[in-house]
Image (spheres, grey):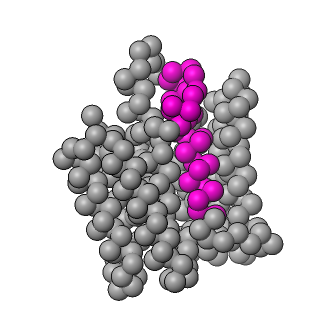
Amino acid sequence: MWNQLKAQVHATDWQDLLPTICIQLITWSYAPFAYVVGVDGTHFTSHFGPLFLYELCIGAAITLAINHHFASQLSLVPLALSVIFAGIGFLKSPILLTLLILLPAYLVLIQLPNINLRGGLRLVTLGILITLTIPVACAFTSTHFMSWVIVRYFVPLACSIWFFYGPFFITNVKHLVPFESVTGLLYAAAILSHPLSVATIFALIISLGAWFMVILPTTREKYWNFVYANLAQLVTIVLIYWT
């Protein structure tokens, strides 16, 4: 086990890891901040420190899991830290704490060798869990209330995770193209659920360009990686929620 852990440390591209998790932090936090700035009585507290550290740990764990084909012992380190940060920040909010712990538990579960979840199902579940945890926790920390209205506001974020993370969860090309097409349509519908503007049109154009890059084997293998996928996701999320 120790030798495998050392091998994963050496095999990890640390130069790509840092920008990836920073991009993920901004992406997952932007939508809830866009929501709370329009709510009366919003204020920011020290709880954001543990929450941001939690997000960085989750982002690192997801990136490591993908880099090591969902058999990353190294990802257990940030996952353990994420549970600690969740406890520090949300010990007095048992519902949120449970959700925040459920996400790292799921990331451990999908990497167990005897768990055979299909790539699409694994990704859809991950997108739902991320949406129900990180942005909801960000909004709750500022507004001190939760509702399904808030959750619905974050639907584009879930769709973006399904769409942009698809190539890294689904290795079978025959399954990847229809999955990307369906999630791309869902993401387009989520974008169009917001008022049509120059920003949302650009978000649609970027998403369409990403779709073409993913379905074409040459561009997918040569130019598409997890850093670029997260960067494209960030740009589209900012354009969607830009006010």
Q: Position of residue 131 (x, y in %)?
A: 55, 45
Mark yes or no: residue 234 visible. Answer: no
Quadrant of res 60:
bottom right
In-image side of 200 versus 173 (left or right): left
Quadrant of res 75:
bottom right
183 in relation to 118, above or below: above
Mark yes or no: residue 121 visible. Answer: yes
Q: Residue furthest left?
A: 198
Q: Position of residue 42 (x, y in %)?
A: 44, 18
In-image side of 76 versus 37 (left or right): right
In this rendered view, identify the residue nearer to me: 75 or 211: 211
Q: Main secondary structure of the magenta part?
A: helix
Location of the N terminus by quadrant is: bottom right
In-image side of 73 versus 174 (left or right): right
Q: Which residues are magenta?
A: 122-151
Residue drawn at point x = 40 percent, y = 40 percent: 30
Residue drawn at point x = 70 percent, y = 55 percent: 106
Q: Position of residue 233 (x, y in %)?
A: 38, 56
Quadrant of res 92:
top right
In this rendered view, identify the residue nearer to me: 188 or 48: 188
Location of the C terminus by quadrant is: top left
Q: Residue furthest right?
A: 114
